[in-house]
Image (cartoon, rainbow, N blue to C red):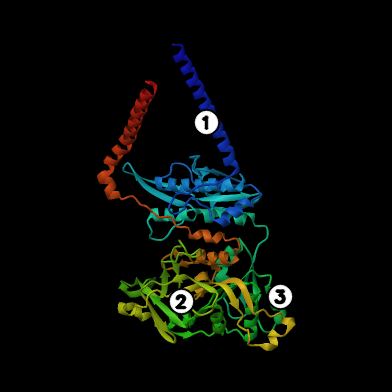
Amino acid sequence: MVSTQKKSQKRKRNDWFNLWIGIGFIFVFNYLGSLLFTRLDLTEDKRYSLSDATINQLEQLEEVAFVRVYLEGDLPARYKKLRMSIQESLDEFRVYSGENIQYEFIDPSESGDPEIQESIYRELSQKGLKYTSIRENRSDMRSEQIIFPGAIIQVGETEVAIQLLKSQIGAPEEVNINNSIQQIEYELSSGLNKALQKTRKVIGFTTGHGEFEPLDVADFRNTLMEHYTVGDVIITEELNQIEQIDSLRLVDVLVVANPKEAFSEKEKYVLDQYVMNGGKVLWFLEGSDVSIDSLRKNNITMGIPLDLNLDDMLFRYGARVNHNLVMDLQALPLPVVTGMVGDQPKQEMFPWYYAPLLTNHPETPISNGLDAISTSYISSVDSVGSKGIKKTVLLESSKYSKIAQTPHRVALNMLRQLPDERQYNKGRQTLSLLLEGSFESNFKNRLPQVENNPKLKFKERIESSKMIVVADADIIKNQVNRNTQEYYDMGYYPYTREVYANKEFAMNCLHYLADDSGIMLTRTKNFTLRLLDTQKAKKQGDRYKILNIALPILIISLLGLLFTQLRKKKYSK
């Protein structure tokens, strides 16, 4: 009896000893874990892993950034998924920022008072957030809900609004939400970067060669001014070349927007040395000139080659804008009078093949996940030579494309005829190129008097730089009411009243060229969309519900029986 009691006491001491050892191990493990932070992302698409650029940005964050997310309340399941993904991303941001990221989720409709709601909606709209209307059928009743799927990031007195819900025309809602989840890291990082920005980078628009008037690109320029300092830069041979080159050093990105007059060799030299000194260029060039006024007046015009005297320089940099017109069966519609109804003309919409509608974008940091982009009289771009330069396609036509070499007759009466689809067999045509790498001067070994003149400070190569070539300047042009001098949103097409993603594309181009941190690379994140098979769910739903309830109970019961038998066997000895 005494022996049994001693064994029992010894067993209790051992149990208590093991318990305290276990508790001590947990404390030590947690302490070491707090010193050595690491996370393991087991998802196939690495959706819970932040990019190095984002982690570096957060680790250097010295101020508290407060994020107000306006996505809360009684939301449909698909929007709750978006909300949860935003919260998970913010939690990841908090870990790397040392608690310098704080956030809250707000329901702008929480009050229930229509007047208060309207006031809040107006305030959020003024700050730059866009609302989304959700329509649902519940219990044979149709309900409508207004949400603001965005956030406002505040650092000190600076506030930046970001839109977290992305949409594509014609895409299912599940696809739009999945695309939005893919872009959460980029939107948060980009918004944080804007809120922290102390000095603005400088964007310059070239003038002096028939470029767009400021009103023609007013929406683009005004949007740029929210993030950058924007101004005009005169490129002319009448000014001193050295002074022009020196003044251009203050410009981070140069936008060449629709020049119509040829550049002289001296002017090209200024542009070339701007590139050689590290400047970035966004080229919006037309390969062919089509007179819209003549087409409207006479229903016919000619597309003629546009010689800007830039071909040799762009060729040296790795691209060639062809003097042609890309026609595409996937195109914007144009209204045509097809008859009369009483005394009123009857109009029908027909695709205008000279205005390709770009929908299938390559997965790049600039074009990935964008909605459709409208174009008109666009040319193709070739990737040529130039070792050491990486070329990335940003925009391309559909596979149902045709090339019209200029001079080319453009007539509206073609809309009355069905196209010969056999002619639209040229496949996808490159319409925009990103060039990155080491650029060589177009004037190397051409002008000894320039190269040997120390005053000109000639540079023959830049080891690392980037530029973008877009073969359609109309992408950044906005519609203008000449009578009132008012302009519409960039990408707005009056005949369909759609706003296409031209602004997003152009802004992404600028952000990429001006971005030295690599944050834009997070836009290439892709998550696999695993949609529920609704038909299979209807047929087998009950079976899986029962399985999900019964299987865990069965497993726990079996484990309990096994544990009981092991204890009986252990203590019966």
Could you tell me which residue is drawn at 62 percent across and 79 percent down?
272
Q: Amino acid at mark 1?
A: Gly
Q: Secondary structure at mark 3?
A: helix
Q: CA distance from mark 2 to mark 3?
A: 34 Å
Query: The disc labelled 2 sits on which kind of residue?
Result: Ile
Q: Nearer the viewer, residue 451 or 228?
A: 451
User: Residue 531: x and y, percent?
Assistant: 35, 52
* Mark closer to the chain start, 3 or 1: 1
Tags 3 and 1 in contact by the CB under 8 Å rule? no
Q: Residue furthest right?
A: 455
Examine the image and state in which quarter residue 396 appears. Answer: bottom left
Camera-side residue: 448 or 241?
A: 448
Is 458 placed above or below 395 here?
A: below
User: How far is disc 3 from disc 1 in space, using C-alphas?
Assistant: 69 Å
Residue at image location 72% in from the left, 78% down from the top: 243
Along the line of sight, the residue nearer the viewer: 63 or 379:
63
Q: Closer to the N terminus: mark 2 or mark 3?
A: 3
Q: Which quadrant does the C terminus fall into?
A: top left
Relative to 11, is 393 above or below? below
Residue pointed to by mark 2: 378
Q: Residue furthest front?
A: 3
Quadrant, the N terminus? top left
Which residue is pictured at 30% across the width and 38% down the height?
Answer: 547
Q: Nearer the viewer, mark 2 or mark 1?
A: 1
Question: Which comes before the other along the chain, label 2 or label 1?
Answer: 1
Q: Nearer the viewer, residue 425 or 99?
A: 99
Side of 199 relative to 503 (left or right): right
Q: Which residue is mark 3?
A: 246
Q: Looking at the picture, how far across and down is residue 100, in whole percent?
A: 62, 46
